Amino acid sequence: MTNSLSFSSRKAGMAAREGALRLTHAVLSEKKLLDEAYQAEIETGPLRKLPGNDRAFAKRMVITLLQHLGEIDSILAMFMERGIPKKSGPLRNILRLGVAELLFLNVPSHAVVDSAVSHFRTWRKYAGFKGLTNAVLRQVSQKGAECLKDIDAAKANLPVWLYEDWIKSYGKEAVEHMMDVCNAPTTPLDLSVKAHDTKTQDIASQLEGQWLPTGSLRLATHGKVDELAGFEDGLWWVQDTAASLPVKMLGDVNNLDVLDLCAAPGGKTMQLAALGAKVTALDLSGKRLQRIQKNLDRTGLEATLIQGDALKQKFQTKFPAILLDAPCSATGTMRRHPELIHQRNAADIAHFAKIQARMLRHAANLLEDNGCLVFCTCSLQQAEGPDLVANFLMEYPDFSIDPIEAEQNPELAAFIQGDGSIRTRPDQMAELGGLDGFYAIRFRKCT
């Protein structure tokens, strides 16, 4: 459990919970990304007038709910034999947030129950459910912690299709470890640095960061990103260390023409530019390209940005090196984006896999002879990685896997698979806060 939540005032506590309720609806019912919904609530919702700490608590409540949603719903089912009444509006999410506070955030029961009932002052149409809310949450406060011990957390918190897929791929013990890391109260922040020099070392000391074996700087705790030391000077950018590994697979890119396909959010583009590559970065979204340009300007790095479709874009010349970070289900990022597993289904995986196969074929046609192509996804699904390789190699017999070797890439050694590809998982480097799940493989085009 985390430390007990505390708010600057009772009024602020209620406003934060109203914001949390709206965020929960936006994520689970409207399928919005949590960060985007949170920003909207700060700008126009009940969170806009709250201090930063109270806003952060509101988001923490929702993250906790999303991390433990299966357990929370199982607990509610134990104390509501007839289930959630039909046409009960916000009742389900009010109760979910209440259970999250009681069982996972260690908030005093009187504060939780009183606040949950107070929601119905806003939702007067559903005021008849105040008594039920009171009764259920009081029972949870008294008996819920004991009942929680009998629930298989990993199995409960993952959708059935995803749980079964991960058990098949990684085994039950690994899945449980992955979920333990993903459900940690806080997630560290990783930074990629533009250059390893004295100034960067000074900034690392100021930030109290820890250098990871992969070369990233990890911050266990942090404030607002744009207020951290070194941000304005453009010394670093935010990038999970797992996301930084595919660029390292390209080898020495200094003065090399490199095509970065599906470039947003831009971390790999900046990595390549910092290593001296002549980068052409392609993305479908003009808005995302604007954000990449803003970060390039901040860091003093250069790249050619092109808005275009990675399935269709043509170029006058071919490239000696291509990086394809293909769109995917992003299940590997759930330790930072717990909403995603509740917004995906098995059909989504098949959909993304088809797009990835098409993009891989198109990328292959843009590569020079003897060129290097790195394909990666931030997914833990086999269908969005290893399962694509055999068909690709059959269709393109002039390509072969160019295996990563530990001697040449010691920072990648811990993640190398039998075929020379790399796989990262949340439970790797767990003692330091874990990693995003990534799959990456390097191909070479033969002459």
Image: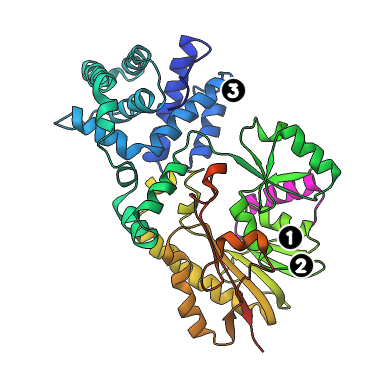
Q: Is residue 19 visible?
A: yes
- Secondary element type, mark 1: helix
Residues 75 and 94: in front is 75
The answer to whether the residue labelled 1 contacts the one labelled 2, judged by CB atoms less than 8 Å apart, is yes
Q: Disc 3 designates what residue? A: 52
Residue type of the residue flagged with mark 1: Leu
Which residue in the structure is indicated by mark 2?
Answer: 253
Q: Find out whether residue 352 is within the magenta segment.
A: no
Task: Classify 434 as above or below 55.
Answer: below
Q: Position of residue 201 (x, y in %)?
A: 80, 41
Label 1 environment density (alpha carbons within 10 Å; few <14, some 14–19, many ≥20): many
Q: Is residue 369 left or right of residue 427?
A: right
- Magenta stretch bounds: 282-302
Tell whether label 3 touches label 2 (CB within 8 Å): no
Residue 100, image x, y percentages:
37, 28
Which of disc 3 and disc 2 is earlier in sequence? 3
Asked if residue 284 is among those painted magenta in the image, a careful observer would answer yes
**Dominant SS type (magenta):** helix
Name the residue: 64% across, 48% down.
239
Query: Which mark is nearer the camera, 2 or 3?
Result: 2
Whether residue 23 is visible: no
